[in-house]
Image (spheres, rainbow, N blue to C red):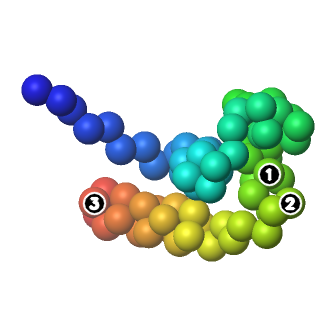
Amino acid sequence: MTKTVISYRRIDHLKAIALDCGFTNEDAKQFGKLSKTATWEALLETYGIPLESVDTVDTLDTVLDTKLEA
């Protein structure tokens, strides 16, 4: 049985977008450490890839988490 793990971390969403766009870890290393969110943001922003979808997901997660805690 395969278990699907969904990550809600911003860096994971940014990495997924970058990899879907055909970028590699080597491309990202030009902008800093692979473990830093700012590295992936810089990579995407440099090539004009919008980050709105990542921000929307993070906002939605926060709203859902807040509702679940209430």
Tag 2: amino acid? Thr
Tag 1: amino acid? Leu
Tag 3: amino acid? Leu
Q: Label 3: which residue?
A: 68
Q: Earlier in the sequence, mark 3 or mark 2?
A: 2
Residue visible at 63% across and 73% down in the picture: 52
Q: Where does the image place residue 27, in percent across and percent down from the top left?
A: 79, 39
Residue visible at 80% across and 51% down in the picture: 43
Q: Is residue 14 visible?
A: no
Q: Label 2: which residue?
A: 46
Q: Is residue 55 left or right of residue 66?
A: right
Q: Secondary structure at mark 1?
A: helix
Any mark on residue 43, and which?
1
Could you give the CA–CA distance between mark 1 and mark 3, rounded to whole angstroms? 34 Å
Instruction: Looking at this view, name the residue that lies furthest to the left.
Output: 1
Q: Is residue 70 above or below residue 2?
A: below
Q: Is residue 61 above or below residue 2?
A: below
Residue 59 versus residue 67: which sits nearer the camera?
59
Is label 2 in contact with label 1 (beta carbons under 8 Å)?
yes
Q: Earlier in the sequence, mark 1 or mark 3?
A: 1
Q: For the image shown, how many numbered marks are present on the structure? A: 3
Q: Where does the image place residue 68, in percent across and percent down from the top left?
A: 28, 60
Instruction: Looking at this view, name the residue that lies furthest to the front.
Output: 22
Q: Is residue 44 visible?
A: yes
